[in-house]
């Protein structure tokens, strides 16, 4: 899943804007502490281990930002039963991402989506389904960006 996924080629396309952001990307300890505090608050609000609604498709959408750059992300649950399913992961913004019919496994709140070869240089640090609020919590780290990106994906109408 990419809130900043892509390869070196895509970063070259970003040109001077990314270079300027990267030069100022040394991790500010205060800013990182604030990010971690906000993440801890979000995760504390993530309650419930229930199953997602049975409506299909089921869509969750949100955005994350780092270094002034923003990525929109949508997860579409195409099928799901007994803790396993298939999802589409689509991202727009810095780098386009289109992962179709990727395997999903749910264990309690934790979600595991196997992205395979549709994305490179990306690590999903946190992916949780919060059944009490019907949201998805996400933290990703793109290898070429030094700061993880956090996002809450809210349930939306799939046509939006």
Image (cartoon, helix red, strand yellow):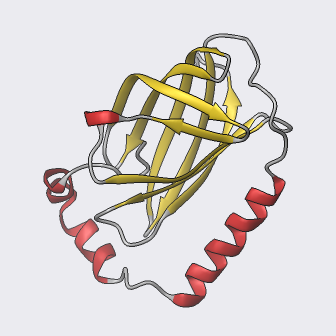
Q: How many marks?
A: 0
Identified at 44% across, 50% down, the residue is 3
Question: Residue at the location (75% across, 58% down)?
Answer: 42
**Image quarter for residue 81?**
top right
Q: Is residue 63 visible?
A: yes
Q: Nearer the viewer, residue 59 or 84?
A: 84
Q: From the viewer's perspective, is 94 left or right of 83?
A: left
* Res 79 → quadrant: top right
Q: Quadrant of the N terminus?
A: top left
Give residue 68's position: percent from left, percent from top.
44, 66
Task: Point out residue 101 in the picture as x, y percentages from the top left corner.
Answer: 42, 19
- Residue 149 spot, x, y in % from top left: 50, 60
User: Quadrant where the C terminus lies?
Assistant: top right
* Residue beneath the point at 46% across and 25% down: 103
Quarter assignment of residue 54: top right
Residue at image point 22% right, 57% down: 14
């Amino acid at each position: 899943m990419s809130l900043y996924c892509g390869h070196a080629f895509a970063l070259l396309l970003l040109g001077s804007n990314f270079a300027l952001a990267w030069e100022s990307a040394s991790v500010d300890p205060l800013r990182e502490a604030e990010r971690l505090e906000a993440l801890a608050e979000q995760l504390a609000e993530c309650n419930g281990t229930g199953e997602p609604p049975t409506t299909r498709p089921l869509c969750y959408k949100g955005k994350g930002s780092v270094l002034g750059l923003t990525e929109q992300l949508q997860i579409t649950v195409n099928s799901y039963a007994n803790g396993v399913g298939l999802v589409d992961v689509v991202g727009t913004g810095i780098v386009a991402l289109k992962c179709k019919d990727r395997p999903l496994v749910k264990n309690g709140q934790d979600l595991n989506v196997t992205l395979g070869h549709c994305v490179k240089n990306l690590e999903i640090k946190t992916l949780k389904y919060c059944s009490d609020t019907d949201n998805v919590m996400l933290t990703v780290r793109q290898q070429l960006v030094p700061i993880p990106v956090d996002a809450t994906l809210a349930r939306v109408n799939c046509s939006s």
